Amino acid sequence: MQNQLKITLIQTDTVWKDIVTNLQNIEDKIASIEEGTDLIVLPEMFSTGFVMQPNSIAETMEGSAIQWMKKTASHYKTALAGSLIIEENGLYFNRFIFVHHSGALTYYDKKHLFTLAGEDKIYTAGKHRLLFEYKGWKISPFVCYDLRFPVWSRNTEGYDIALYSANWPKPRINAWDSLLKARAIENMCYCIGVNRVGTDANNLEYNGHSQVIDPLGEILKLSQENEEAVCTVILDKEKLDSCRRKFQFLQDRDAFEFTENDG
């Protein structure tokens, strides 16, 4: 059990469909981190941008981006997480990948696909939430649009950290800020949201606002707006447990059960 967990958020300006350039940009930023970190979190579709034509850019679970994640995690002795476009059995997934420094990985397929952009017509929705343990911390990952659906994020298993990897556009950034804070408060957990910056090929602007929020809704770290950024914060398990013991709000939570038939 590790009482403190050092987490680094990397907020990037993703180059459209340029996997090589994007991975090199991220690796340069990882190399700039002065001290070791336990976990590095990247934006949604960090190697390509939010692409709706995945047939020309999708990778498999043995592809270059996954191999890069494994190599980088091993080299820097850290865990690495973020979402990628993955093709599997003729289907496309917006898949959140978590790679341990050992090379072991686990993943979560985005449940709520962004119908406004037609994501639901191209990608296959995931059916199961993911809860895993890392260095004694229970973590549950989500992807972008999942943030708008509190029942899906409801902390029924006692997770310590909710991770949100996103490409959240500037015009709706107030919702991003508000919903991240709400998810932290209602779930009595640390809530981490990592967004991108820049403009994509569809002329959508992204202004970042990557942040870490504590279980009472206080912002522990907020990235600079409209700029690439590397932000590191230390989470404290004893403070989290103490907060939960004092307020005990999770004891009054509703018990939701999820099945493959859930909408």
Image (cartoon, rainbow, N blue to C red):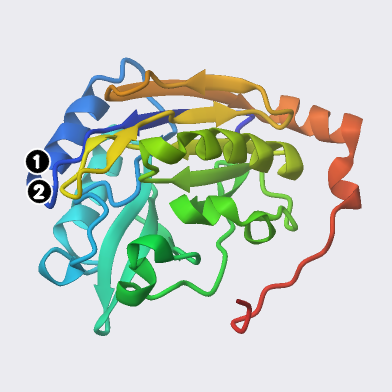
Considering every residue shown, the one lying at the far top of the view is 34
Q: Residue at x 67, y 48 (%)?
A: 159
Q: Toward the viewer: 114 or 84?
A: 114
Q: Is residue 29 above or below residue 60?
A: above
Mark 2: secondary structure: loop
The disc at residue 233 is: none
Question: Which residue is disc 2 drawn over?
Answer: 18
Question: Which residue is disc 1 drawn over?
Answer: 21
In the rendered structure, which amino acid carries the disc numbered 1? Thr
| Residue 143 percent location from the top left of the image | 45, 53
Mark 1: secondary structure: helix
Q: Residue at x 39, y 72 (%)?
A: 120
Q: Is residue 229 visible?
A: yes
**Which quarter of the picture shows residue 229?**
top left
Other residues around mark 2 within 10 Å, as few (<14) / some (14–19) / many (≥20): few
Q: Is residue 154 left or right of residue 253?
A: left
Q: Toward the viewer: 232 or 182?
A: 182
Q: Toward the viewer: 169 or 96?
A: 169
| Residue 227 percent location from the top left of the image | 28, 22
Q: Is residue 225 above or below residue 180?
A: above
| Residue 77 percent location from the top left of the image | 34, 36
Q: Which corner quadrant holds the C terminus?
A: bottom right
